Amino acid sequence: VLDFVYMKGCDAHAGFPEISYGQFCDRLVRAGYKVARVEQTETPEMLKERKNQAGKGKKPMVVNREVCSVTTAGTRTFCFMDDS
């Protein structure tokens, strides 16, 4: 739909710039996909602290991210901030 290359992982996913979210989300939802918005929930400083607190073994390497919303055809809303 967007001609993007999928990122590595067990589930197909792709990233795009925040400023384009409204436009790309709309195109994906109109094509029948569910769109999960994932945001960073930790700063690099917080990651550093988490690394320091981790004991022996594998240390965390990336900041935490969480799904903050899921958009489907039934939950799509439109507002003045959308590009579409």
Image (tube, rainbow, N blue to C red):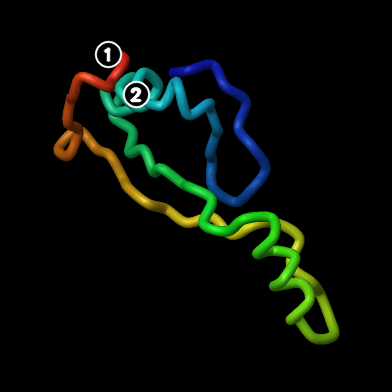
| Left or right, residue 81 beside residue 17 | left
Characterize the local packing of mark 1: few (<14), some (14-19) or many (20 or more) Cα atoms within 10 angstroms: few
**Tag 2–tag 1 contact (CB < 8 Å):** yes
- In the rendered image, residue 67, in percent from the top left (x then y), is placed at 42, 53
Considering only vertical position in the picture, is 78 above or below 41? Answer: above
Q: Secondary structure at mark 1?
A: loop
Q: Nearer the viewer, residue 18 or 29?
A: 18
- Residue occupying image coordinates x 47% and y 56%: 66
How far is the residue under mark 2 from the one under mark 1?
Answer: 7 Å
- In the rendered image, residue 23, in percent from the top left (x then y), is placed at 36, 18
Q: Give the quadrant of residue 74.
A: top left
- In the rendered image, residue 84, in percent from the top left (x then y), is placed at 27, 13
Q: Residue furthest front?
A: 45
Considering only vertical position in the picture, is 23 above or below 13? Answer: above
Give the residue type that dot 2 points to: Gly
| Left or right, residue 29 beside residue 53 | left
Considering only vertical position in the picture, is 23 above or below 38? Answer: above
Q: Nearer the viewer, residue 5 or 51?
A: 51
Characterize the local packing of mark 2: few (<14), some (14-19) or many (20 or more) Cα atoms within 10 angstroms: some
Reading the image, the residue beneath label 2 is 22
Q: Secondary structure at mark 2?
A: helix
Q: Residue 5 got which mark?
A: none
| Left or right, residue 41 beside residue 8 | left
Reading the image, the residue beneath label 1 is 84
- Residue occupying image coordinates x 64% and y 37%: 7
Considering only vertical position in the picture, is 70 above or below 47? Answer: above
Quadrant in the picture for the N terminus: top left
Q: Residue furthest bottom?
A: 55
- Residue occupying image coordinates x 35% and y 27%: 25
- Residue occupying image coordinates x 85% and y 85%: 56
Give the residue type that dot 1 points to: Ser
